[in-house]
Amino acid sequence: MPEHAQLVKRLQVLGDFGEFALKSDNLDEILTEACRLVGDALGTGRAKVLEIQQEEKSLLVRAGVGWAPGIVGHMRLPMAEHSSETFAIEAAEPVISQDIGKEDRFQVPAFMKEAGVVALANVPIFLPGRRAYGLLQVDAGEPRTFGPEDTEFLRTYATILGPVIDRLLQVRALRGSQERFRLTVEAARDYAIFLADPQDRITDWLPGAEAVFGWTAEEAVGQPGAIVFTPEDRETGQDQKETEMAAAEGFAPNVRWHIRKDGSRVFIEGSTRALRDADGRLTGFLKIGQDVTARRAAEARLHESEAALRRLTETLEAQVEARTAELRQALSAIQVEVRQREQAEQRLLQSEKLKAIGQLTGGIAHDFNNMLQTITSGLSMIRLRAKQSLPTDIAGYIDRAEIGAKRAAALTHRLLAFGRQQTLAPKPVSVDQIARDMEDMVRRSVGPAVQVELKLADGKWLVMCDPSQLESALLNLCVNARDAMPDGGWLVITTEEMVLSADDVANVEDAQPGRYATIAVSDTGTGMTPEVAAHVFEPFFTTKPLGQGTGLGLSQIYGFIRQSGGIVQLETTPGKGTVVRLCLPFHALNPDTAAASPDDVGKTVLLVEDEPDVREMTAEHLRDLGYRVLEAEEGTAALRLVQAGARLDLLVSDFGLPGGMNGRQLADLVRERHPGLPVILITGYAAGQEMSGMEIVHKPFDPVTFAELVRAKLEAVDPVSGPPGA
């Protein structure tokens, strides 16, 4: 085509596009027509417009001709660093590729190669303000040289496209804004909105105005704006004053009562605004008002309530003071009653304990005298056989005396524990041994009418708990069983090992499944109903007559077992009896040997004891074990040895010492000089003393057990030496 004819054709294309753009407000139509015209002008028959989307991360094929339906409006290209499209946008210059098969500057999208594109021209499209919109891309199906006249034509075409696209985008945004405004206005049913001409004749009556005032648009349009004013406001000219003020100042408030079509009144809060054209001429009024009738009614009720409240407040102080005085008197009486009840409960609890001790006294005295008889008889026979020079019989008498002494010691410990006068601490305990040790006391406590039987599993299991507490719990259960059998019956103490599953302990907080050692007390008494059994472990709950029980025994047992990590199981049937089972977690213990280890031989023990016989026997026993022993009869003498620089590895002291210093106080003073020194306190009675970090041994103690404890304390810490030169 001659150059002149080609130029004329292209000018015609530009003119046709401009004319079409003025006729249409549809962006997609205009972009599609632009692609058709440019494809015809360049003879390619194929062109497209790419629009930047997703914050400049991709290009959408927004419009095009000569492409399959699945491409236009759907295909997105990433704005890759090495694409011709990205380069053209960033450089703001046309990018031409005459043959993409030979192109090594850019990467061409696969869908274009598959569509047979061989050559292409990219021209960036900018909106006013140099805002990048996208690209006009012309595609050819064969190699092609896009000459300077082609490039300049495309640049001009893209320059015209930019403002056209911008105008259409603004039109679209304006229409969207208008639609949103229309929907908002129509949805605001409690806002009366209408327009009036400069003479205050209604020209537009929106749905909100109909909802508030009752007139339809057909009824209201053409009427004066004063139709919504009350007769008294029209008589005083309030409607005219409002429009005059708005015309003069641009705005006039409208806060007053108005009238509805049915004659009822509505309170409006709103305004009237003047509308003017570009030359400032008044074109009408915009009137907006909100129906606040319900709110004003609520405010009126609130004001009435506030007034009533103020009146009440004026007399409230006197009423409160009078009522407070009554409450103070009642509270004082309640406090007195609570104190009296607490004192009565304490007296009752102590009375119950004394009563129980009194019931045991006869049997205990008998048992204790038997034990003393065994000891004194054994010692007498030892003395006699010694005079007769018959030493072979002495060992048997010594064994009997030791057994009697141990039984007396065990009985003393149980009495102290029952009276809560003994310092208590958890340690490994055999439930079988507890049952055996308590058998005599249980028999004495329940009386001859109740037959007592022990069914022990003879297991080697140990549990970690306070043995005195466990003994007290066992005795308490046996006494309860006796009370449930007023005419006598059978009481069985059973020990066994149980494996509790997760289901078995599911209803017990913090309880863990595993191996448990159990000790159970069963009776053939009256049993309990389910209602009674549900409350049996609650404090102060008792089924005994007034004055015969505090209701604290089972709750204390429950608390002790739970604190020891165990659980309590209850089985009972009315008329058939009850089983209470104490389950304590299995505790493994590696027994120590009594003799001193080779590393302990020669270590120094400071022994403080005011009873000479006890001190001498204990010191001799320690020396036999290989220890070096320093002796002192009271605290002051012991401190003199310490201050003299004596080497110390262990302090063994009686708790009750003469001279105003007890064993605990002595230990604290010695530890000031020897921090971390292991301490063993020996006592027959230590009520309420804090013994943190110190081992307690109760008199009379077993020498083998004492030797094991000494060795354990020495092996638990590094040797402690005195000051240099000691």
Image (cartoon, grey):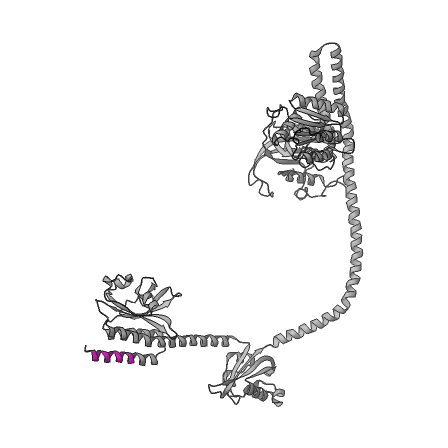
Q: Where 484 sits versus 367, above or below?
A: below
Residue 41 image-quadrant placement: bottom left
Residue at image location 79% in from the left, 38% down from the top: 351
Q: Is residue 644 left or right of residue 599?
A: right
From the image, which quarter does the N terminus lie in? bottom left
| Spot occupied by residue 570 in the image (x, y as percentages of width and height) | 64, 38
| Spot occupied by residue 651 in the image (x, y as percentages of width and height) | 68, 30
Q: Where 105 sits versus 413, above or below?
A: below
Residue 603 image-quadrant placement: top right
From the image, which quarter does the C terminus lie in? top right
Q: Residue furthest front?
A: 725
Q: Where 584 sits versus 262, above or below?
A: above
Q: Is residue 545 left or right of residue 679?
A: right
Does the magenta-highlighted stretch encompass residue 73?
no
Can residue 683 be seen here?
no
Residue 405 image-quadrant placement: top right
> Between 237 and 653, which is closer to the camera in this rendering?
653
Residue at image location 75% in from the left, 33% down from the top: 662
| Spot occupied by residue 204 in the image (x, y as percentages of width and height) | 49, 83
Can residue 295 be seen here?
yes
Does the magenta-highlighted stretch encompass residue 8?
yes
Q: Is residue 621 left or right of residue 111?
A: right
Q: Which residues are drawn in magenta?
A: 2-16
Residue at image location 31% in from the left, 63% down from the top: 83
> Between 666 and 266, which is closer to the camera in this rendering?
666
Instruction: Name the main secondary structure of what is drawn in magenta.
Output: helix
Q: Residue furthest left?
A: 2
| Spot occupied by residue 327 in the image (x, y as percentages of width and height) | 78, 58
